[in-house]
Amino acid sequence: MSITERHTFRGGEVRTAVRDLAPVALGLVPFALLIGVTGARSAAGGGTAVLSSVLLLGGSAQMTALTLLAGGAASGAVIATVAVVNARFLLYSAALEPHFRDQPTWFRWLAPHFVVDPTYAMVSRRLDALADPAAFRRYWLVGGGGLALAWIAMTAAGALLAPVLPASAALTVAAPAMFLAMLVPQLKQRTGRRAAAVAGVVAAVAATLPHGLGLLAAIVTGVLVTTLTDRSAS
């Protein structure tokens, strides 16, 4: 192992990742608590909710899976539905593939697990500064790994505190908090402002959709606008 590899976590990318992660993780707290509460109060159980945070690391997919499992759905139906819900990650993966391509094998196996809405929102505005593979790796491991740990911990907290946490109150603030946490950092760039404006309109129009589908639609729309804008500019 080289000196550079030993000191992987001492670069400025680490501090930047921590700064970017803090508001996002804070915004995700109500949503993660909600996942834990919902799982603990359903037939699926709190343990299943925490396990879903480890394996899926995605609130929309987790809530969908827990709802289906609690309703007695077949495992095949649950897997198929979760795959459809998470299909948007294919867009994120395609955009990030050039940055994964020149990474070590272990990173290419581990890193895709952290490809979720918040991590993509965080890294997408930093890609120009993370052209160096080592810099990207440092940022992604701290941002993605930190987000995963926070999400799992808050899900577990929700499962443990389910008897005293009102699920309805958590649901009221979860989706808006997550959306704002990902939205505000994007306003520093013109592309981000354009995507944020379109996503905000979609979120407002689709706010009444069940199971957080309005937020999901807003996120996907914002990603599409960003992708199309970047392609037209290149």
Image: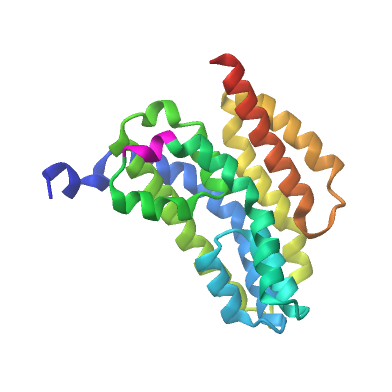
User: x and y percent of residue 135 in the render?
Assistant: 31, 36
Q: Which quadrant of the structure image shows residue 133?
A: top left
User: x and y percent of residue 53 in the render?
Assistant: 55, 67
Q: Main secondary structure of the magenta part?
A: helix
Can residue 80 be seen here? The reply is yes
On the rendered structure, is 9 left or right of 65?
A: left
Q: Is residue 7 magenta?
A: no
Is 98 drawn above or below residue 172 in the view shown?
Answer: above
Q: Which quadrant of the structure image shows residue 134?
A: top left
User: x and y percent of residue 26 in the render?
Assistant: 56, 54
Say which residue appears at 57% left-offset and 15% top-offset: 233
User: x and y percent of residue 208 in the render?
Assistant: 87, 51
Extreme residue toward the front, this view: 76
Q: Which residues are magenta?
A: 98-102
Q: Which quadrant of the structure image shows residue 227?
A: top right
Can residue 30 be seen here? The reply is no
Is 221 drawn above or below residue 170 in the view shown?
Answer: above
User: Is 97 or 20 nearer to us in this picture?
Assistant: 97
Is 4 drawn above or below residue 34 in the view shown?
Answer: above
Say which residue appears at 71% left-offset and 84% top-offset: 43
Say which residue appears at 73% left-offset and 29% top-offset: 197
On the rendered structure, is 137 left or right of 114?
A: left
Is 120 drawn above or below residue 211 in the view shown?
Answer: above
